[in-house]
Image (cartoon, grey):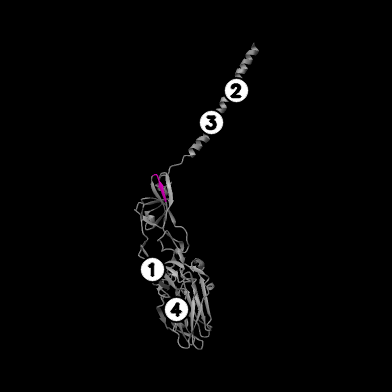
Amino acid sequence: MKNTSKLVLALTLGLFVAGCSSESKPAVASSSSDKPVQSAKTSSVKKALPVGEIISTKTNNPNIAYKMANKRVKFYRSLREFGTKGGVYADYISEKGDTIGIDKIITTTKGVYYHVVRYTVSEAHGFEGKKKPDSLGYVGGQALRPFKTIKSEWTYAHKQPYYVADPNSHRIWNRPAYTEAYTYITHVFDRLTTQQLYATKELITHKNLHYVYLETAKGRKLGWVYKARHTLIAGKYRDPGEQLLKLKKHEHLVTKVQSKKSTKNRVGVNDSLSLQQRAYLVKNRKNQIVRVLIISMDNRPIKIYFRNGRAVKVKTYKYRRTLWRSTTNKKKLRSKYLVQHVGSYLSVDATRSLFYSIKNKKLVRVETLGFDGYGYVVVYRNGHVKFVTGGEGDSITYSINDYK
């Protein structure tokens, strides 16, 4: 009887323990699986944008210009930061006067928003080529007003002939600076100074500046350049030797041109380093040099008169080939003669002529002293001519192949 009671008690305890064990395991499993489920549920919930839900996004032409509509305009780094103090990227004060383009239009449940860019000129005054305009971030749809960068533009009934005077002051652009979202230099005048050019179009910017669109005589499209008298001369191209040197009887003309390789084929921001310098030598019946016309690195003519192997007069011309300065000073013509525009060294190169004794093989050396580099022409008494172009070591220059 006792054994029977013990057996019943043992079975009862076994069933009770087994039941407790089977009930405790699901409880542990349940508590460990609840946490990942809750975490996944939390991470799937996205924080709503302050601008509302995005309905559509489309690209837009940034070359359609705008200005800020009022002084309260703010630009934000992202739509998620829109309207927040910490999300402000720029405002009216920082962008006052800038022209703006819209490159993206975003429509949301709360309205229309724009991603905008600042009208930008390529770095180094236009010499860094085609890139992208600077981003200004996002702005509300009511923050901008339309603006015209071009007042008028027209095509000539007949193309207008021009040739180059000053190759340094202005370059050729894809569009006038700041009239499109990104403007940059497409060509320079270094290798165009002896060519006939034609203007086919003209425009007036919102600042009342006139630009003309140029192409070569063969129809190669170049781009837009500021219509300045010191940059372009209206009319058919005239060779400076024929224009400024009048040959007498028994005189003959010898023309020397710097090779392209000798120029180093570089383009400077401030100088025409790839311009091929020229020397026109007028000789008498004894084959003596009596006059020299030098076309310097900045395309200005310098004419020097000689008698019995000595310089007796120097005429320095302006870019438009009209007389600027003249001297017969014997002291200067025995050593050196410098002409320059004081205070304008960044835009107008200085010119220095060095003279030698009649015992020296050299007759004269004409130097062009620029900001990015220099050029000089050495004329020897036997008619030999040496051309040199060099750049300043710390000046940024570019390959002529990208701008010719």
Where 225 sits versus 134, above or below? below
Residue topped by disc 1: 156
Q: Which mark is nearer the camera, 1 or 3?
A: 1
| CB atoms of marks 2 and 1 within 8 Å | no
Quadrant for the N terminus, please. Answer: top right
Question: Which residue occupies 47% across, 78% down?
Answer: 294
Q: CA distance from mark 4 to mark 2?
A: 115 Å
Mark 2 / mark 3, whichever is N-terminal: 2
Q: Secondary structure at mark 2?
A: helix
Please state which of residues 311 and 319 is positioned toward the viewer in this rendering.
Answer: 319
Q: Secondary structure at mark 3?
A: helix
- Amino acid type of the residue that numbered disc 4 sits on in the rendered structure: Pro
What label does residue 240 carry, if any?
4
Q: CA distance from mark 2 to mark 3?
A: 21 Å
Q: Which mark is nearer the camera, 1 or 4?
A: 1
Count all numbered tags in the image, as a single digit: 4
Q: Tag 4: Cα neighbours inside 10 Å, few (<14), some, or many (≥20)? A: some
Mark 2 / mark 1, whichever is N-terminal: 2
- Amino acid type of the residue that numbered disc 3 sits on in the rendered structure: Ser
Please state which of residues 279 and 201 is positioned toward the viewer in this rendering.
Answer: 201
Q: CA distance from mark 1 to mark 3?
A: 84 Å
x and y, in percent, of residue 161 in the image: 41, 73
- Amino acid type of the residue that numbered disc 1 sits on in the rendered structure: Tyr
Q: Secondary structure at mark 4?
A: helix
Mark 4 / mark 3, whichever is N-terminal: 3
Q: Which mark is nearer the camera, 4 or 2?
A: 4
- Amino acid type of the residue that numbered disc 2 sits on in the rendered structure: Ala
Question: Which residue occupies 41% across, 81% down?
Answer: 326
Residue topped by disc 2: 18
Residue topped by disc 3: 31
- The span picked out in magenta is 105-109
